Amino acid sequence: MRIDILTLFPDMFNLFDESIIGRGKEKGLYTINAVNIRDYSKDKHRKVDDYPYGGGNGLVMTVQPIADAIGELRKVNDGPVIFLGPKGKTFDQSKASELSKKENLIFLCGHYEGIDERLYELIDEEISLGDFILTGGEMAAIPIIDSILRLRDGVLGTDSSSVEESFSENLLEYPQYTRPEEYEGKSVPEILLSGHHENIRQWRRYMMLKTTMEKRPDLYSRHELSKDDRKILKKFSEIE
Ligand SMILES: C[S@@+](CC[C@H](N)C(=O)[O-])C[C@H]1O[C@@H](n2cnc3c(N)ncnc32)[C@H](O)[C@@H]1O
């Protein structure tokens, strides 16, 4: 997979050299290329912004450097151009999964008051991180790229690591415990120590359903209960 990021602050993406994403990069599973928009400015002072027509606060990113940078990238990257912006659809796990299947992506990070509207002609999609305003698109691109890359084959330790976690099937993950068995009077649920794989599976599934119902009813309403889910819900609600 190849990811190109158009930004005024390429060094911000050095954090992808660390940890799990950094190891994937070293293994050659993907390339992450941060391109400085300023390098494409035809202005003698490498200017990339200007005052808004009609007046108002702040500066707007100009068309020329970004349009030229996209044009240049198009020679090596035929993926969708994604603008990180608050007017886009809010990013979620299913979008992460969709984008993780592409071989090429281009992200455009806005700054100041945003980008000149005419650039939307070169943009395939706008994605928002949420209903709040960030200082720059980099702040949204970083978590979004992280969530996409960790879904690529070979990035996480085992294939199942991303299958059973929160948001797959619109459910939150079950509670996790590790050593010690008891900490300051608080014990690990007995069922997890039983070694009975089927009972553990059912308990975990029950906890996924229960946790989602309690913490995220909006998500739970989008989960389709299977026959097994109904059986598990009945069994554990009778025990509780
Ligand atoms: C200060 S913001 C501009 C906000 C713009 N004036 C508005 O009110 O919609 C600068 C840049 O940060 C990025 N940004 C801000 N909030 C974002 C969000 N919720 N999701 C994704 N990107 C965001 C965009 O690239 C935006 O161009």
Image (cartoon, helix red, strand yellow):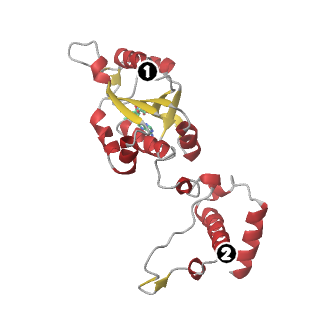
Query: Of residues 219 and 79, which is closer to you in this image?
Result: 79
Query: Of residues 23 and 104, which is closer to you in this image?
Result: 23
Q: Is residue 35 visible?
A: yes
Q: Is residue 132 visible?
A: no
Residue ID at (65%, 64%): 209
Q: Position of residue 167 (x, y in %)?
A: 58, 53
In terms of image quadrants, where is residue 202?
Answer: bottom right
Amino acid type shown at disc 2: Asn
Residue ID at (51%, 45%): 153
Where's the C terminus, which quadrant?
Answer: bottom right
Query: Tag 1, which secondary structure?
Result: loop
User: 10 Å neighbourhood of mark 2: few (<14), some, or many (≥20)?
Assistant: few
- Circle on res. 199: 2
Q: Position of residue 234 (x, y in %)?
A: 76, 73
In terms of image quadrants, where is residue 14?
Answer: top left
- Image position of 197 (left or right of 185): right
Q: Is residue 171 above or below residue 84?
A: below
Q: Is residue 6 above or below residue 27?
A: above
Q: Position of residue 98 (x, y in %)?
A: 58, 38
Say which label, 1 or 2, has the lower sequence index.
1
Gap in Å between the C-alphas at discs 1 and 2? 52 Å
Question: Looking at the image, which residue sits at the far left?
Answer: 45
Query: Of residues 11 and 54, which is closer to you in this image?
Result: 11
- Circle on res. 76: 1
Q: Is residue 183 above or below residue 98?
A: below
Amino acid type shown at disc 1: Val
